[in-house]
Image (cartoon, rainbow, N blue to C red):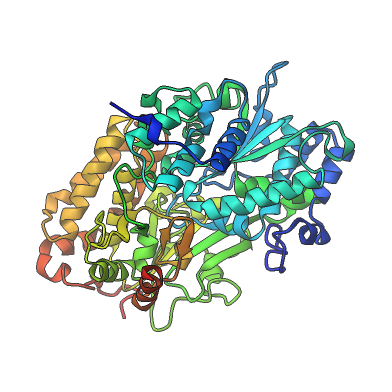
Amino acid sequence: MTNTQTVQFPADTLERVHKIIKRYPEGKQKSALLPILHLAQAEWRWLSSEVMDYVAGLLNIKPIEVYEVATFYTMFHLEPVGEHVIEYCRTGPCCLMGGGEVYDHLKKKLGVDTGGTSSDGKFTVKEVECLAACGWGPVFQIREKYYMNLTTEKVDAIIEELSK
Amino acid sequence: MKILTQHIDVPGIETIDVYRQHGGYSAVEKAIKTMAPDEVTEEVKKSGLRGRGGAGFPVGMKWSFLAKPEGVPRYLVCNADESEPGTFKDHYLMMKSPHTLIEGMIVSSYALGANTSYIYVRGELMYVINILEKAIQEAYDKGLLGKNILGSGYDLDLFVQPGGGAYICGEETALLESLEGKRGNPRNKPPFPAVKGLYQCPTVVNNVESIAATSWIVNNGGEEYAKIGVGRSAGTKLISVSGHVRKPGVYEIPLGITVEDFIYSDEWCGGIRDGHKLKAVVAGGSSVPILPAELILKTTNGENRLMTYESLSDGGFATGTMLGSGGFIVMDETTCIVHNTLTFARFYHHESCGQCSPCREGTGWMDKVIHRIEHGKGRMEDIDLLVDVAKKIEGNTICPLGDAAAWPVAAAIRHFRDEFEWHVKHPEEATKPGAVFMREGASWTL
C-alpha cells in the first residue's frame, strides 16, 4: 500500500535526525518524533502517509504512533499545501487590532477562503490560534517567519514580494 | 527594578560574550563553585518566587517535592510552550536574551541534580528555537554546559524540543507526554511529575520566567528578592500587554504597582489609545475573568487594585480576577465583548484535547452558542445556557483547560450580560460591521 522507497531525507538531514535521536535516553527515541516531523514537513511541505511511514521506520516505531501524533498537532499539514502557507492568527488580541479586516483583505487578494490554496499554487491560507505575539498584532506566520503589526498595505507588499 | 530585562536592549546581548560582559553566568559560577545544590533550593524558597506560567505555585516548594531515589535520573523541563492568548513574555525574553534562560536552566538543573534538561518551546517559534540552540552551543563551547562544568564535576546536557502547535502542551503533564513523542493528553494526577514525570522519572517543570529569575536569586540571595514586591507577591513580573493601549509590549514590573499606574503611566502602557476610553481588561491571559474598567482599577472596597496575585483576585470571581500568566489584554469602548468572548470560546474549543467529555463537548457548545448570539441568531435563554455549560465543565476535567475555557465565558456574562442581551434583542443592529453596545452611563461611554 505504501511505498517508502521514494521517500528519503537527504544525507545532511539524515545526519541531523541521528543527532536529534541522541538527545534522549536509550530506547526513548520516540521523543524525536515531533522534531523529525518538522524536518519532514520542511522537506516535503506536507505529511503524506508515505512520509509518516518513513518517519516511523527511522524511529523504529509503528506507523500508527506517527499518525496519532501528526493528527493531534495543528502545525502539521496532512494534505498538500501551496508553496507558502500563511498561518493567520484569529484569536482575541489580534482581532482587537483589526485582525479580522486585514484577514478579509488577504483572502480577497488571494481569491481564497480559509484552508484554500491560490489558483497559482503559491499560497495556502490557514487560520490558527494565538501565536504568542499579541502585542504586535495582527500577526501571521509563514514557515519560521513572523509578520507583525499587519495592515492591508503591508499584506499587499508581503504578497507581492513572495509572488516574485 | 529590573531583574530579567535589565540588559535586554544592549546590542549583542544574545551573544555569550556580551552577555558575560554584563555579568552573565556569574550565578552559574557562584552556584556551582560555592553552593551545595540544596543551598540553591533554599535561596529560591526564601525568595518567595512563584511560578510565572500562571498558577503561581511557589517554585522552591515545587523543587522540594522532587523525589530523589538512588540511581534514577531526574529531569528539569522548561515550559516554553507559551500559548495562552495575551501572553508573549517568554517569546520576548528568549528571542532577545536567550542566555538569561540558559543561565537559569544551569543553576536550576544544578539545584535539582538533573544532568539532562529540556526546554520545550512551542513549535511555531522555530526562529526562537534557532536562537536558543545557537546560544546553547556557545555555552557548550565555553564549558558552561556539557561534562565537568567549570571543573566542578557537575555534568549537564541541555536540549531544545519543539512542540507541534497545541495549547494543551502548556499543561505540564501534557507537555511531558508530548516530549515523549505522544499526543498531548494530560495525565491523571497523582502521581505528580515530581515523582513520576518524564520517562516515569522525577521531573520538575517550570516556566521560562521562573527559571530565568533563579540566577538573580543566586547572585543576590533569596531575601533580597523577597524584598521586591508586596507580601506573598515577591519579585518582578513580566507583563505582556496587548490591545488598545498606546504602547503595547512586554514590561518587567515590580509586583505591587497599581493597575491604574500600569495602564496610564508613560513608564508602562502609556494610557488608552488617543480619543478612547478603557472598557475592560483581561489581566492574566485569556482564561482569567474579564473585568470592566471600574473593577480592574478599584476593588469593591474602593481600594486601588495592585498588580499582585492577591489584589487582582480580591473579591473572588464575583468582582475580581487573577494575575495568571501576566497576559494583559486591554479593551477600549470599541470592543464588542460578545465577539471577543467568541474568539476565546473558539480557541478553547479548538485546543481541547478531547480526553474529558465535559471539556470536549462543553467547549464545542459554548463556541456554537456564542457564535449564534454574535451572528444575530441567539435566544434569550442561550445566555443562561452558557452559564450552565460553563458550570458543568468547571472542576470536572483532568486538567485545568476545562476551567480555563469556562471562566472567560462565565465572567463575560457576569459583567456584560446586557451586551449579550442586546445582541439577542437587536440582531440586525448588532450584526452590522463595527456595531458595539454602549451601556448607558458607563465610564467608557463616549
Q: Position of residue B162 (x, y in %)?
A: 52, 43
The answer to whether residue B134 is above or below residue A137 is above
Q: Quadrant of the C terminus of chain B?
A: bottom left
Quick one: which residue is furthest to the bottom in this view? B275
The answer to whether residue A16 is above or below residue B69 is below
- Left or right for B166, reference B422: right
- Left or right for B212, reference A78: right
Image quadrant where residue B293 sits: bottom left
Quick one: which residue is furthest to the front in this view? A5
Q: Is residue A144 visible?
A: yes
Q: Nearer the viewer, residue A35 or B228?
A: A35
- Left or right for B420, reference B192: left
Q: Is residue B305 visible?
A: no
Q: Residue at x 45, y 36 (%)?
A: A8
The answer to whether residue B191 is above or below residue B419 is above
Quick one: which residue is furthest to the top in this view? B70
Q: Residue at x 61, y 47 (%)?
A: B208
Q: Position of residue B359 (x, y in %)?
A: 31, 36
Q: Position of residue B283 (x, y in %)?
A: 46, 58
Circle count:
0
Q: Residue at x 19, y 45 (%)?
A: B385
Q: Position of residue B187 (x, y in %)?
A: 45, 26
Q: Quadrant of the N terminus of chain B?
A: bottom right
- Left or right for A142, reference B207: left
